[in-house]
Every structure is written in structure tokens, then in C-alpha cells.
Image (tube, rainbow, N blue to C red):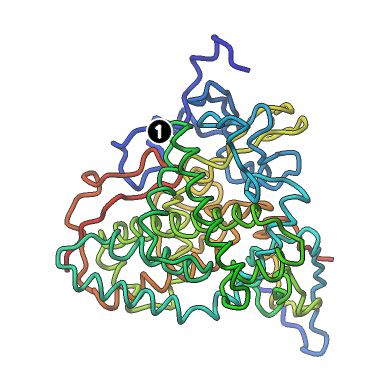
Amino acid sequence: MTPAPRPLSVETTLRVVVDRDRCCGAGNCVLTAPEVFDQDDADGLVLLRDPAPRDALRERVQRAVDLCPTDAIRFD
Amino acid sequence: MTQSTETTLPLWPPVNSARGPFTPLDDAERQRYFGPVTRVLLPTGITAWLVSRHTEVRQLLRHPAFSSDLTRPGFPLLRPLPPEATRDLRGAFLQMDGAAHTRLRRMLTAEFMIKNVRRIEPLIHRTIDEALTDLAAAGPPADLVSTVALPVPSKVICHLLGVPYADHDFFQSRSRRLLDRRVPPEQLQQAAQELRAYLRSLIDTKRARPDDGEDLLSRLIRERVEPGELVVDELVGMALLLLIAGHETTANMLGLSVLLLTRHPGRYALLRDRPDLAPGMVDELLRYLSIVRTGLFRVATEDVEIGGRSIRAGEGVIALIALANRDAEVFDDPDGFDPYREAHQHLAFGFGVHQCIGQPLARAELRIAMVELARRFPGLRVTAEPQELTTRDHSIVFGLDRLPVTW
């Protein structure tokens, strides 16, 4: 079911946290949601470009959570 | 753990070339092996648990209580280990756990990250263009494996590492031996030693000319070895792993992918007409072909429950990614190849801390090679039936020895 449209001004955002100690740098998250995740030039480990992505990215961030091989990404 | 009563257990891996290149296990074999947890007997006489469903394979490969250290008692070895005095596992981080593994892997993660692979795409393109020119010059007909599938990833990894491609006969023959389960331990050991000696001497040469190279090995020498963070023999082991993993896997994927896609001309043409679909098709190819068919091997370091079964510390487990990638709970019509499928949940690169570090490179090589091949050779077809081709049934990495094509 399509959710009811919300006014732009109160668009909900997601809260995403990453754990660089767990990250193995495989890059699935960057491939899946490049607006939200990046890899550090120095060590290739995950960097959060946007810790509060807009709700429209929910599906892809969820996919990045599912695909992460080391469980290094979660919704807060 | 071997007992005479266990000789009735099903043997793993089953060799059965009659099933053809696209069927990891036939129906009868699946009856025997597919399930949350199944007990099997390995050629070494060791027993192990086979785990083949998507959920349990993910759980197992991400679980900290499973070790990749093949020297641990109970490890599910397919071949006997060489004697301790002659084996050298320094730098072999695929066989390490915890902090020792993390330390070495993290020296490489930035090298293979997506944006760096994007930077070298022109090199990949050039290498593929050259190989396709070689293919055109060689035929028709020609062998696609020796002209394109093997040289492309081999040249790219050589370029990245700073290994002279001119030596490819030497390292390709030995790396093929290392992956062949029929090779006796002493020959295996010899192949490993020859490759190590070769890489060691290459690294020594690079160390003598420290400012010369912008390749990965030169960089690791400057940034890790010289400051004392990394021992040369560890670098040798890392280079060995990257060299083998860097070409055998993609080479076998390429050969099988061409065989699969050209069987249905519409699918092959799709690569040319809809290159935007190519990244998704690559993931579906990875899922469907799952070339690491003997599975990924671990040993439990504590008692763990997987798939409702208690696995005891010291027992071996095998994660069957090829069957997990055909799990109907996750993939609709799992035995069908669907170029439009979103196959991103596949486990062809493994899962957990050891998941393939080179996957952005593999994806780029496969995508560019397949699209360019379809563009330059729109009429390409294989001149043998899949059943007539020699498959690598005894290799750790499944694939084709040759692929005769015409156009």
C-alpha cells in the first residue's frame, strides 16, 4: 500500500549508524546507496555521507543493511 | 572424528560431469545434500556439516565462532595438509581469523574500493579491447578462454600488482595446480613454493628500486614493509592470494557467462542493446553460475546452533554458496536465469569478514567484457554443446578449460 503523501517540510528522515571496527570494506553499501555511504580514501572502510537520509532512501538503505557481510550498518 | 560407521555418509564433493555446467547439483544430489544441516564425509576421511540454505549460510559465514584456520584440528580439509615443516601460510589472510586477518586485509581494502576500481576502468577497457582484437585475429573459429576469458583478468591483476604478464604461463599453470583437488600434497606444496619464490624475488627486485613503481606491491613495500609494519614473507603470501584470486575466478566466470548467454541470442543481444542492464545481469550471472561450488570451509571454535542443529567446537562446516544461491525461499524460480532479476542477495562473493575484497574489480571486468564482446561480436556463438565441454569438476573454482566459438 502506498503511504499517504506527507508535506515536504516535515518529511521524515532515517537514522543510520555504521561501525567501522566491524567493516570489512567490501563496498556493498556504496554500490547500493552511494548517497548515504562512501569508503574512506585512507583505509577503504565505510564512511557515512549522510547519517540522516531522507525517507525515500529507506528501501536502499535497508538493502545495504541486509547486504553488509559484517553487520556493520544499522538503523538507529 | 572418523569412524567406520560413518563411511555410509554421503561423500562431498560429488564429482558428476554429466550434470552439465549450469547445474551445481542434480536433483538426486540435492535430495542428498540440501537442507539446513547435513552430515558428509570428505576425501580426507574427515566428516563435516554441510549448510546449504541462504539464511543458514549467511548466519554461519558471519558467526564469530567459526574459524578459517585450516591448521585447526577438525578443519574440513578436502586434501591433506602438507607437513608443518614445509608449509608456509605467512600472509595467507584468507585462512586467518580475528585481528591477524583484519590487520592484513585492511592493508588492501582501500586498493580495491569502488572508487579506485572506477579509476582503473580505462585500463580494464583497454585490456578488453586488446583481447577482443586478439580474438578477431585468431579466428573464426577461436578459443574464447585462451584469447579473452583468461588473459583479461590476468593482465589486469598483473598490472595492478606489478607482476610481469610475460610470466603468465609460469604462474597460471601453478595456480591451476593449487586449485586442483586431485593434485597430491607434495606437488601442491611444490607449486606453492615455486610461486612464493617467484613473488619473493619480484618483491626483492622492487625493494632494490624503491621509487620506481606505482603498483600495489611497490606501494605496500614503501608504506608497510620498509616502515616495519609488514614482513616481506607476509607480503609474498598476500601477493600470492591476490594473483590467484584475481584471475582464476573472473576467468572462469567469463567463460561460463559467454556459454550461458549465447545459448539464448536474445539475452546476448540485450547486453549490446541495454548495457544499462549489464550490472544487474552480472549479479545474476554470479548467482546462477556460483563458481566456488565445493563451498566455503570453516571449523567451529565453540558449540553453536545452526539450522536447529548443534554444531560442536572442533567440528567442520561447509557453507554451500552454490545451493544457497538457488534457494527458493530467496529467489523466485531459482534454477532459471533471469537477466532482469535483482539478484543482489546472492552469496557468490561469500559473506562475513572474508567476503571477496576484489568484488568491485570482478564486477567491472565482467560487465565491461560482456558488453564489449556483445558489441564487437554480435553474432558470437559457441560451436560445442554444453555437455561436450570439459568442465573443471576437480577444481576449487569451477569453469571451462576451453570454449570454442565462431562468429
- Quadrant of res B97: top right
Q: Residue furthest top?
A: B4
When the figure is inspected, residue B346 is found, relative to residue B326, above or below; the finding is below
Q: Quadrant of the N terminus of chain A?
A: bottom right
Q: Quadrant of the C terminus of chain A?
A: bottom right
Residue closest to the eye, B244 or B33: B244
Badge 1: chain ID: B
- Estimate the x, y position of residue B342 in percent, counting from the top left: 51, 64
Residue type pointed to by label 1: Arg
- Estimate the x, y position of residue B376 in percent, counting from the top left: 26, 78
- In this rendering, position of residue A31 left or right of residue B225: left
- In this rendering, position of residue B13 left or right of residue B354: left
- Quadrant of res B5: top right
Which residue is label 1 attached to? Answer: B182
Q: Which residue is at a point 36% across and 64% down the rendered structure image? A: B151
- Estimate the x, y position of residue B68 in percent, counting from the top left: 66, 41
Q: Which residue is at a point 50% across and 38% down the rendered structure image? A: B189
Residue closest to the eye, B2 or B164: B164
Question: What is the total number of numbered labels drawn onto the structure image?
Answer: 1
